[in-house]
Image (cartoon, rainbow, N blue to C red):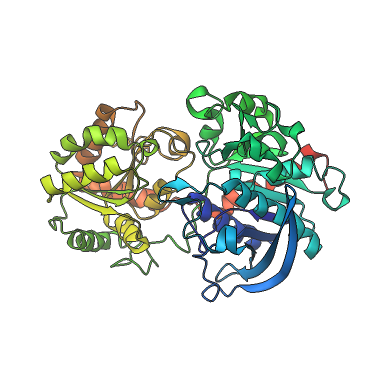
Amino acid sequence: MKVLIVSSEIVPFAKTGGLADVAGALSKALKEMGHDVRLLTPRYKKTDKKKFHLKELLSGIEVKMGGKTEKVDILESRIPGTKVPAYFVEHEGYFGSRDELYTVAGKDYEDNLERFSLFCLAAIEMMKKLDWQPDVIHCNDWQSALICAYLKVTLKKDQFFSRTATVYSIHNMGYQGTFPKEKLPLTGLGWDTFSTDGLEFYGNIALTKAGFVYADVINTVSETYAKEIQTPEFGHGLEGLMKHRNKDLYGIVNGIDYDLWDPATDKMITANYDTVSIGIKSDNKAALQKEQKLPEKNNVPMIGIISRLADQKGFDILAEAIEKIMHLRCQMVILGTGEPKYHDLFKKMREMYPEHIAINLGFDATLAQMIYAGSDMFLMPSRYEPCGLGQLISFKYGTIPIVRLTGGLADTVKEFDAKSGKGDGFTFRDYSAEALISAIKKAIETFASQNTWRKLQVKVMRYDYSWGSSAKKYIDLYRTALVKSGKKQ
């Protein structure tokens, strides 16, 4: 099968979140299965041409946008260590000169609609110039959603795409690509698409609706989240549309790239270990404590957090609970950046409880791997979590997750029962500081029984959340899209 995965970020070229991990790892898994999979993404300023061996493939492609014409080049490379082709849309003004992917000083770039309309239109032109006709175009989030609309509206009679179906994956309903309606002509779509059955959303346009309305199949990153987004609590105003299309809506849990996340081979951690040598994990804990200037006590449980510091990730209830947590017998190390109020809060906590908490405001890939390897527990108290990768990575490192039961967290983490040995983590359902504290206390109490804890660690380390299983489900999804579109090969 020929598949083009279109994503606004891809590991290792550019990343702000889990979308980048999914795009890179899924493509590798599909390639290993023998499929002709290719990637398309913008060439951002931070995507170094020399480092990633980007070479010009097509030059001077004209893209028409609302009465004006822009020119783009297409560059080509490979995902490092693989034969997966990666294409890059190069436009100096929209992508090459920007320090960040979507925002500046915490605010969205004002011309994001123009930037990603160009990206989507360039994708269409690129496929034609290469004379490469994919069976499926797999779009991800609002930045590439317009492609689904183009194939159903402006390219409806174009024979080049007569055998191509579209899949639209939503990784977080909270990001919808909302813009003033006056910008609609810049997308290349007509005013006939400005309706509740099209891109209109409370008087504006939401580019994510281009995927939800026009894609042959809609997919999100866990079965539970696929159900949740059909409710007012999680639908962000689009729950009615999700209900309308629920027969075309599927959920597939993300996988983990074990080439990157494996304590037996991880070059970023102090000591490598596996299920047989799990005792060596304590060396990583000691190294993390030393690096973070925390007391080096192996018998005190370490709770790791790697996250965007935002309400969605549960930091509002963590803020309520933090002082009580500091009085429990534990340590906590936090890595992430986000809302200033949480920066200030955790800095204050560090000053007040220097033996209990360490704060790292930013992102450090090496430190992230040290936290997974050196922590005993991994905390994800999210208000909502479409899939979550942290809990899956923590399993592999023998670091037991503490999670709120929502989205992909509910699909992958089950409450541990020490008597029966069933389950694999510590969970809570009520979105409250009290419920969070209760789950942490239970984890700490269980940690005190090292024999029980060691068995739990070995159990979760043996889980297989590799992309192979998820990739097979995506192939089934692609075939379903072809059937639903009437373009079955």
In the picture provided, is 444 more to the left or to the right than 238?
left
Quadrant location of residue 171?
top right
> In the rendered view of the protein, which quadrant contains the N terminus?
bottom right
Q: Nearer the viewer, residue 378 or 242?
A: 242
- State the count of labels: 0
Going 53% across and 46% down the picture, which residue do you hit? 110
In the picture provided, is 353 more to the left or to the right than 288?
left
Is 386 situated above or below 459? above
Q: Nearer the viewer, residue 16 or 480?
A: 16
Going 37% across and 49% down the picture, which residue do you hit? 459
Q: Nearer the viewer, residue 280 or 101?
A: 101
Q: Is residue 235 visible?
A: yes
**Relative image position of residue 283 (x, y in whole percent):** 23, 63
**Relative image position of residue 142 (x, y in whole percent):** 60, 43
In the picture provided, is 156 more to the left or to the right than 409?
right
Q: Is residue 1 visible?
A: no
Q: Nearer the viewer, residue 364 or 149?
A: 149
**Relative image position of residue 463 (x, y in whole percent):** 44, 50
